Image (cartoon, helix red, strand yellow):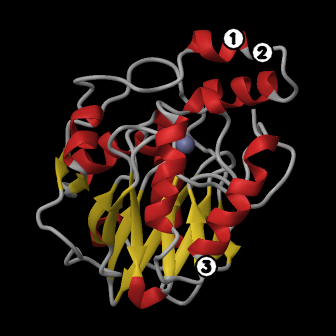
Amino acid sequence: MSRTAHYRLVPVSDRVHLVDGGSVNWVLVSEGDSLTLIDGGYPGHADAVEASIREIGRRPEDVAAVLVTHAHVDHIGSLDRFAARYGTPVHTGTTEADHAHRDFLEQATPRDVASNAWRPRVLPWALHIVRAGALGEHRLDAATPFPAEGALDLPGRPVPVAAPGHTSGHTCYHLPELGVLVSGDALVTGHPLTSFDGPQPLVSMFHHDRARMTRSWESLAPLEADTLLPGHGPVWRGSPREAVEQARANSSRVW
Ligand SMILES: [Zn+2]
């Protein structure tokens, strides 16, 4: 597994950075010297997560808490090491905390991937994620439910928004002060397995319940924001309502 995975820091505003880890994103939100880290890439991104924090002039010790959108390996892979090394609290919803502990698992299996291997783009992507450390069991015992309801007392004042479907406990994070919606995998803007960018769902094999996920878009549409930061794909500028409309229109183009 690569321990020197490349990443690209994408400034969103003076306080917000999206980090493009190649096939998955994580987000850094700063306030003074302190940071909120949202998601953490594959196991192979452990060094890249720390390097991205140092590149914006902070230290891993400055992360006040890690927030998790959902407990798939491409979002939590580096975080067990991070939490153990720095003693950082890790929060997500109650159901997703159980998922992170692997009380149950709602993730595409190697068999799901193999049965779609005939499709364009699947094999190169599968090789990439194996190199990033996708295989094997990955859990995040440090994950605990949010300490409070509503806005969290963390940099960016993130407000968790339940968006179940991709996993049963998937959470998006609304940063009203910053005009940002971190949508995780409830709504993305691109993926190595699709041929176009723009608001869209991920391909079906990744979702525990795709229909439930698209119903969750109803909870995202009314949120006030002008920037969408997805778990996969580029930064997208526009309102959540426009993003949801485009994702609905693009749905039939995604298998
Ligand atoms: Zn993902």
Crowd around label 1: few <14 · some 14–19 · many ≥20 (10 Å) = few
Q: Secondary structure at mark 3?
A: loop
Crowd around label 2: few <14 · some 14–19 · many ≥20 (10 Å) = some
Residue 166, percent from left and from top: 48, 40
Question: Of residues 3 and 159, which is closer to you in this image?
Answer: 159
Instruction: Work out how far the residue at label 3 is from the one at label 1, CA to CA, in angstroms.
Output: 36 Å
Instruction: Work out how far the residue at label 1 is from the one at label 2, CA to CA, in angstroms.
Output: 5 Å
Quadrant hosting residue 128: top right
Q: Which residue is mark 2?
A: 117
> Nearer the N terminus, badge 3 or badge 1?
1
The N terminus - image quarter: top right
Q: Are marks 3 and 2 in contact (CB under 8 Å)?
A: no
Q: Which mark is residue 210?
A: none
Q: Amino acid at mark 2?
A: Ala
Q: Amino acid at mark 3?
A: Ser
Q: Secondary structure at mark 2?
A: loop
Question: Of residues 19 and 226, which is closer to you in this image?
Answer: 226
Q: Secondary structure at mark 1?
A: helix
Residue 133, percent from left and from top: 54, 28
Q: Which residue is mark 3?
A: 239
Q: Is residue 185 above or below residue 71?
A: below
Q: Which mark is residue 114?
A: 1
Residue at x 46% of width, y 34% of height? 73
